Structure formats: C-alpha cells, structure tokens
Image: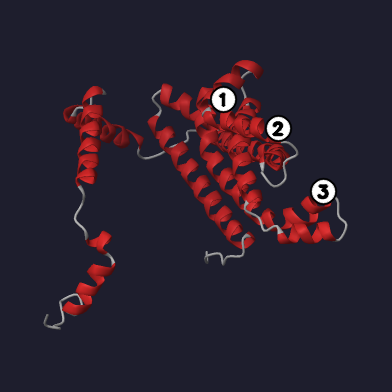
Amino acid sequence: MANTERADGYTEIENAAMRARYASVFAPPSWGGRLFAAAALALLVFGLWHLGFSPSRFLNGVGSLGKLIVLMFPPEWGDTATLWRFVKSLGETVAIAFLGTLLAAGIALPLSLIAARNTTVSRVLRFFTRRSFDTLRGVDTLVWALIWVNVVGLGPFAGVLAIAISDIGSLGKLFSEAIEASDQRSVEGVKASGGAKLHTIRFGLLPQVAPVLIGQCLYYFESNTRSATIIGIVGAGGIGLQLSEQIRTLEWQKVALLIIMILITVSIIDHVSTRLRNAIVGGKPTAI
C-alpha cells in the first residue's frame, strides 16, 4: 500500500490502521439502526397526521401571528396608574418565585438527607421519600396552581404554594443526588474525631455540597420567575394576571409592554444568577 498523504492529512497506512483499530466507528450503519430510524420517522409522520397537523393551517396561523405583532406596536401603558400597576405586579411575580423557591429549598434539604443513600435513617423511609419526590414533581406547576387557587383562593399565596410544592420534588431529588455523590473522606474524618451523626452531616457533608445546592436553588429561582408568570394567568397573582386581562380586552399594545417587561426582568435575573452560580461553585463570572 502506497504511503501517500490524503486530503485529511493522514497517510494511507495511518488511515488503514485507524480503520482497523476503530472498526465499529467506521462500520456502515447496521440494518437495526436503519430500521429504528425508519420507524421513528414513520411514527413522526403518523403523529402529525393523527393530531391534525396541516401546512395550510400552520401558514395561516403564521399570518395571523404577524397581524397580532403589528397591532402590538408601539407598546404603550396608558396612564401612570396603569404603569405602576404593571410594575407592582411584576414585583409580585418575582416575589412569588423567590419565596416559592426559598420555601421549597428549606423543606427539600432535610427530606433529601432522608432520601440519600449515605445519610438515610431507614431504607423504608428512604423509599417513600423518593417516591414522594416523584409524585410532587410529576405534577406540573400550573396544575398545582389550579389546585391551590381552589384551596386558598386567588392571589399570590396560591402561587407561592404551587411553586414550592412542585420544587420540593425537583430540588429534593437533586439535593439527594448531590449528597450521595459527595466525598465521604471528610465525613469519615469527623466521625473518627468522635463526632456524632449530626456532626458528620453539619461539618463533613454540608460544607462540600453547599455550593452545588445553592447553585441549583439559584437556577430554579430563575426558572420559577417564568413559571410565576404563567401561573398568574390562572389567578395565582403576579403579572400573569395583568397579561391575561389585557389579552382578554384586546389591548395588544399593553400586552407588548408586559411581554417586554417580563423579558427584561428574566434576562436580568438570568444574568445575575449565572454570575452568582459561577462565583459560588468556584468559576469565573463573565464580565458585564
């Protein structure tokens, strides 16, 4: 075999050796892989047909969306009282997200110690705790909002409870996984010094997992700000309620203003929380 250089920079001999060494990578796709791809494509086509997908309906919808966008500009807020009401509702949305996340983290932390394999007090209790996490996070935040609105009435209190209940399941699972993945040498060191079970958790476990847990809480606060906007539409308070009212009365210019306010707020929270997460976990935050 001539040892000539190919266009990719490898010689024929090097290329042959690479093919022999990584035969599975260079092998043509198997019939099983082709059949799987064909089945996935057929399932996609069938699903679109069964759900009534129509290119003409989609194009007509895009045209209607364009007309709505034209009606939204220029954004306006009307009088000063209306603008102040929008700002107050936006602050209420951020407060719902913050309080809901904080409440969820405070409840999820002790429960995650029970759900983690290396800190649990009972296998049976661990099993039921983890299944409870699955149940709580298996129900969407919007559904929890509908439930709590009927339980405690309209307002931001229902929104806080909806976010908290949903996040207890998610944060509890993430916290327990972080605890299980922790380094046990520091825990063993505290135990060897005569520390009790609570001492090993307080001084050996929590200091090393705290940055990860705080980073996860910051991420969920950022995500819950968007969720709090949605649940406000069903009566759980916040700017979502104002957005629903303006859409119902066809005040599209005010709808545009509310959307812009939400986007700016979410962007600021996203930027700040990202910098905080990077600083907490030891990374270098990007420059503003």
Left or right position of 281 against 4 = right
Compared with residue 82, is residue 260 higher up or lower down, i.e. above or below? below
- In which image quadrant can residue 237 be found? top right
Mark 2 → mark 3, Cα distance in angstroms: 17 Å
Q: Determine the residue located farthest toward the bottom in the rendered image.
A: 3
Label 1 or label 2, whichever lies nearer to me, is 2
- What percent of the width, then of the height, locates residue 214? 65, 51
Label 1 or label 3, whichever lies nearer to me, is 3
- In which image quadrant can residue 3 be found? bottom left
Q: Please give the label number shown on residue 134.
A: none
Residue contact between numbered discs 2 and 3, judged by CB atoms under 8 Å: no
Q: Mark 2 points at which residue?
A: 125
Q: For mark 3, does the 10 Å Cα neighbourhood hold few (<14), some (14 to 19), or many (20 or more) residues?
A: few
- Amino acid type at mark 1: Ala
Left or right position of 129 against 86 = right
- What percent of the width, then of the height, locates residue 60? 20, 29
Residue sitting at x 82%, y 56%: 191
Residue placed most toward the observer, 182 or 93? 182
Q: For mark 2, does the 10 Å Cα neighbourhood hold few (<14), some (14 to 19), or many (20 or more) residues?
A: few
- Amino acid type at mark 2: Leu
Ranked by sequence position, the earlier of labels 1 and 3 is: 1
Mark 1, secondary structure of its residue: helix
Q: Name the residue under label 1.
A: 145
Residue sitting at x 56%, y 37%: 90
Q: Name the residue under label 3.
A: 197
Ranked by sequence position, the earlier of labels 1 and 2 is: 2
